Amino acid sequence: MTDAATGEAEGQGADTDCAQGGRPDAAAQVGGLIFAVLLVDPELRIVEANHAAENLFGTSAKRFVGQMLIDTIGTVGNRVAERLADPEAALVARDQVIAAGGTEKRVNLTVSPVSGYPGWRVVTLSEIAHEENARDDSGESSLGAPTILAHEIKNPLAAIRGAGQLVARKLPHGDKKLARMITDEVDRIARLIDRMQQLGSTRAEPLIPCNPHEAIRSAIATVRAAGAEGVTIREEFDPSLPPVMANRDALEQVLINLVSNARDAAMGDARPEIVVQTRFVSGLAFSAIRLGRMVRLPIEITVSDNGAGIDAAMREHVFEPFVSSKKSGQGLGLALVRKLVRDMNGSVSHERDSRAGLTHFRLHLPLGVADSAS
């Protein structure tokens, strides 16, 4: 853990232990955790914080160490406030909304009294969106059975389409429209099945170092060509950003889906605007568990829009298949985004900043190097 006074010394100690091949000390163990850890004193003032806490709050520990816990995480519910007021009470609170890094984030929160130190407590904050992305699916897809079924459906669909084309040749001109409707609907169903099969695929495409800004600009150009009149799309890029380890086509597809969704959401605003931002959040900012190893995800791509946002009841399900807030939506776009991002060993999360009236979708991706393991 780090604080304004002792962080440097503790870090040097951990480096020495590692160099000597010894067992990691407590500071190194806490520093390597993928969820935020805060040490608070009997007055609920933050004394120490780990690297994951810095990422959660979007700033260095020096800026919030010394502040009161409530001032840092914002207003909490009555139950949480009552437990915090009791210096000896432990607490487990799931799905809490806190203010972190200028946005609202959903977290699971725990408070643990420190034995032998009256009033001192350890607070953990685990962002729910990252927990969901860190799950190991063990190669099994929830769409495995529908994918097999989809494969079997495509054969009769091809026959129906062929029959429709043959019928169209023999029908009077006035009736050809009905035959074309048959083939058009068959094509639409086939495209839907293709997307279901892509979701259920367990084969990941090869990953290579890619320029994220090239993929973003290509995706934006595609969305504009498809129709984005009246929508302002701004780029806020970090020009020094290194390459990411990704599949270029998959990354571009992810960005097309996110920017298209942002465009549709922003259209309801008087001045629709989308902002695509990139930044480097440091090598220890966030780690996700992939295939039994730690993967650092320091490259962040954020797609933000000023639309009304996703209905609150649906926000925790936005990445699930067949969940959509659009009237004609199939609910596969964001499910495909999550699948493709996971295949690239990355993380995707959704946030709604009600105060600013903005919706953020954040991608975290590994560096474009051969070995991104910590």
Image: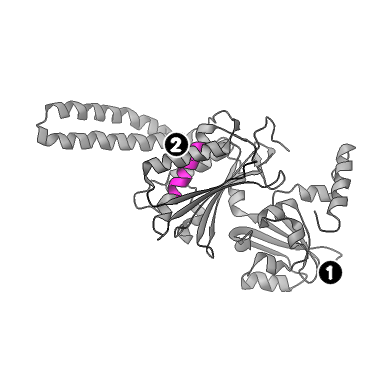
Residue that appears at 84% across and 44% down: 24
| Magenta region, main secondary structure | helix
The local secondary structure at tag 2 comes to helix
Work out whether 199 lies above or below 360. Answer: above
- Does the magenta portion include 152? no
Nearer mark to the viewer, of 1 and 2: 1
Q: Earlier in the sequence, mark 1 or mark 2?
A: 1
**Is residue 311 found left or right of 283 in the rendered image?**
left
Can residue 321 be seen here?
A: no
The local secondary structure at tag 1 comes to loop
The residue that label 1 is drawn on is 118
**Crowd tier of the residue under label 2, counting other residues whose Cα lies within 10 Å: few below 14, some 14–19, many 20 or above:** few
Residue 145's mark?
2
**Crowd tier of the residue under label 1, counting other residues whose Cα lies within 10 Å: few below 14, some 14–19, many 20 or above:** few
Residue that appears at 39% across and 58% down: 268
Residue that appears at 77% across and 59% down: 62
- Does the magenta portion include 253? yes
Q: Which residues are magenta?
A: 252-262
Disc 1 residue type (three-letter): Pro
